[in-house]
Every structure is written in C-alpha cells, then in structure tokens.
Image: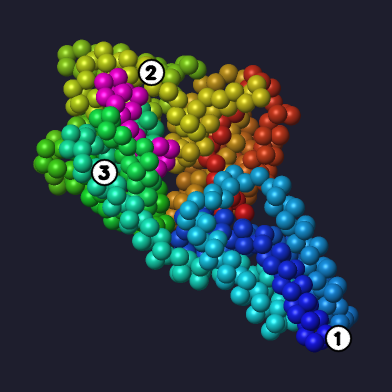
Amino acid sequence: MNNTGSAFGIILLLMISHLSLSFVYAKNALHMFQQNRYELYRYTKWLFNKNNFRISLTFLYVVILLVMRLLFRKGGLILNILITVVFAVILIYKEMNKEYIKPLVLTGRVKRQIAVFSVLLFVATLITVRVFNYPLRGILSIALPYLLIYPMALITSPIEEAVKKKYENEAREILKGYDDLIKIGITGSYGKTTTKNVIKDIISEKYYTLITPASYNTPMGITRTIREHFKPIYEVFVCEMGADHVGEISYLMDFVKPKYGIVTSIGPQHLNTFGSQENIIREKMQEIELLPADGVGIINIDNEYIRDYKIENKCKIVTVGIKNKDADYTATDIEYTKKGSSFKVKIGKSAVKFTTVLLGEHNIMNVLCGIALARELGMSVKEIQKGVSSISQVEHRLEIKDINGFTFIDNAFNSNPVGCKYALDVLSMMDGKRIIVTPGLIDLGKEENEDNYEFGRYMKDRADFVILVGEKNSAYVRKGALESGFDEGCILTVNSVREAFNYVYTHFSKKDTILLENDLPDAFLH
C-alpha cells in the first residue's frame, strides 16, 4: 500500500512539474497557431523556422538533464522534478511579463481549442512520465505542445466548420430580409480598409451606413458584422472582401450579393497562397465579374493589372485614375501639406475642389473611388465635398499621432510594395529629421526579397535614419538602402519595437518625424 501510494505520489509530482513546463510552450503554440490563421500549412512553416523556440533556456535545461542522467543513473528523481519546476517558473515569469505585438485573443474558437488541447496534453504527459525516463521526458515536455496542435486542429476542425456554417446561414437570412439594402463590396490587394472607411464618411452625408469593422473581411468577420451590428435603420452595407486563396472572392460575392463592386488595386500580395500573379488578378476581378447585370463596377485604371484585364460582365463600369487621364474620375492639381491634401476632380463640366486630412497619392485614389460611388448613389456635389472634408484618419494607415510629444506617422497596417513607397514620399515632406521604423515586408512569395531590396533603395533622400526591427525580414531592406548610398551609420537593427521606441526617445527630438511602416505579428519576428 505504501509503495503504491509512493509511486502514485511520484507520478503526480512528475505530472505537475512537466505540465507546468509544458504550459508556456502550449500557450506559445496556440498563440502562433492563431497568428498563422489556424492553418496547419502556415503553422508548420513557422514551426520549422530555426528561430522559433526559446533556444537558449531550452538548451540549458536539456543539458542539465543530460548531466543529471550521467551523475545519477539510479536516482536524482526529486532533483529532476525540482529543476523542471524551476525552469517552468522562469519561463512562466518571462511569459507573463512579455509584451506581444498581437496577444493571444481568447475567442470562442480558441476556448474550444484550449479544452481539446488540455485533454490531449494531460494524456500525452501521463504517458510520457510513465513510459520515458529523463532527459527524454523533459525534451518531450517542450516538444509535445507544438506537436499536439496537429491532432487538436483535426479534432476541432469539424466543430468549427459546423459553428461557422450555422452563424453564416443566420447572417444570410438577415440579409435576405432587406430587399432595399444597398450592398457594396470592396476588394483589392491594397487599400480595401481605407477605401471602406472613406466611403462610409462620404456617403454617411446621405445614407445610414454600416461597414465591416477594422479588417473584418473573411466569411466569419462578415458574419459577425451582420449578426452583431446590423439594424433595420441601415440603408447601405459596405463590405470589405479579403482573399489569399483562389475561390474566396467568389464565395463572398455569393454570400453578400452586392450590387456595387470596387477593386482598389492589384499587386503581388499573398503570392505564397495564390500561387501566381495571374491567380491574384482573376480572383480580385471576380468582384466585378460576379456583379448583377444592373450592377456598377468601379475600378482603378492606374493599376496596369486592372487596366489590362478584359472584364466579362456587361454591367456598368466606372473608372478612376490619377496618372491615367482617360478615367471617368481623375484627380488633378494635387497638393500636400502636413495637415492633409487638396485636389480637383472634373464632375460634369466643372472642376470641383476637394480637401481631406488624408495624405499620400494612394489615399487620393481611395477618395476618388468614394466620389465615384457617391455619384452613382445620387449624391450631390456639395454633399460629396462635405463628406470628403469630414473623412477621418484611418487607424494605422498614414495616421498622424502624437506619442509622448513625438510626431509619428502610423502606417503599421498598410505595408505593401506600393504603400510603403507612398509612405516614404509623405515622410520626405516633413520637417526635422525623418526616421523610419520597419521590420520589412512579408507574404510576397518569391518576390519578397526583391521588394524589400527596392523598399530599402527607396529610402535614400526620403529618410534620414532607419531602424530595422528584427533581422529575419529586414536584411534585404538594409542591403537596398546601403547600395543606394544610404549612410551605414544611420541604419540600426534592433530586436523589438520597444527597443526601437526607446532609441527614438533617447536619440531624436520632438521636432522630428517617425514613420512606423508595418507591424509584423510575433509569428514573423520570432
């Protein structure tokens, strides 16, 4: 009886110590699975990146267990438990005090995953402490959480699909109940969210308007918007439609069935998942090709991919442009100041002047899309002028901010090969020293290194100091900057955004301007 009780006690202690060690790695695994969009393919790519694991502390722990195995061939069990607990406490302390760029969000989906994951981890740990000796069971305590993501995903996937389908069907039924609702779909490689917000500010001068919030552009995000925010008072629903796989725009068009469609731009965004630029073009243009015969498509013909595409739909097509003077709506006489932009648009026989707080040529294009849509919706010139002048800055998209007395241009959510250059053009207009903080660009497929290189080259004469966050994505940015003639002494690489901010606060003045270009999730920095 005593022997049985002792054996049970030892197993219980081992379970507690190894579960406590596994806890931090389990949280990290779930966090990274979420940041990789719950896709096993993306998660696997992240998992096998050599920089992911907490290498130094993990390596030290394994070495100590190996030494213990050599010194205590027939004992050392209690010492093993104590060392495991000590390392667990250190890791938990570090985890609790770590500031993530995008923390783990405890959605309903994540809570269901945690429930399944906890059962799997408990069973796996029990088997580990019963079957394996140290140091192997210590190594498994670290590795198991990352590996258990796979069976957890397979188990929860049917559940999530059923939940999504139920909620989506409810959202479809809500939309069916409002025949007079004006529905507008927006897609593009870049500019979707800004254009959506611009349109809301303009057409709200005449219509009660609901938009999908933030970057809600997936079936589930759109479903949540309809189920949680839609009210009978709304006359217009503006829906951002995102896609990084073939077939997603078609699915969303069938879901929402908009009468008006806008394609803001097309470029090499999400090449890894689309497979080719041709796939991206065809997918984005489904926004126009799947409109009803009495629908209206608004397209940016400054973009060569859009301009050269042969649209297979006889619906009305309205074009906008800045460089292309053949567009139906063209911006001319563009002027920029620190307070915003002004430009003229020919409407009928008159050149109408518009002013906005937004900065950058790409934002003028976004406003043009809004002006064209407003005209199609029957708004007067005065209503549109008032709407454009009331456009608010869009969060994290060339948004001017005062942080601790310093002037920041926050372009964290608008980083792409085109947008980053527009942002540098805006930075070049600012007084004082001009600083850019960036980790580089991501998710650009085989063109990523070249795009980052060109991004670095474009910094010359537009920025005075460059702070690169992390070496993983910024190496080619540095290379491009240096080869363009940028002073090497004015390029600094740091490990985190916090380090970058601390450097700014201690080395620059409040008369200077800092551009925050891109804000990568932790999955891309570790």
Report if residue 482 lies within the magenta region. no
Residue 9 or residue 480, whichever sits in front = 9
On the image, the x and y values in percent for residue 168 come to 31, 51
Determine the secondary structure under disc 3: helix
Quarter of the image with the N terminus in it: bottom right
Say the numbered circle drawn on residue 390. Answer: 2
Image side of residue 92 versus residue 370, left or right: right
What stretch of residues is rendered in magenta? Answer: 199-216
What is the quadrant of residue 256 in the picture? Answer: top left
Residue at left 26%, top 43%?
174
| Type of amino acid at the residue the image marks with label 2 | Ser
Where is mark 1, residue-wise?
74
1 vs 3, front mark: 3
Percent position of residue 324, x then y = 26, 29
Q: Which residue is mark 3?
A: 174
Q: Callout 3: 10 Å neighbours few (<14), some, many (20+)?
A: some
* Mark nearer the viewer, 2 or 1: 1
Q: CA distance from mark 2 to mark 3?
A: 31 Å
Earlier-in-chain disc, 2 versus 1: 1
x, y (%) of residue 278?
A: 29, 53
Q: Residue at x 52, y 56 (%)?
A: 111
Give the mark nearer the N terminus: 2 vs 3: 3
Q: Amino acid at mark 3?
A: Ile
User: Which one is nearer the viewer's eye here, 90 or 420?
Assistant: 90
Quarter residue 215 falls in: top left
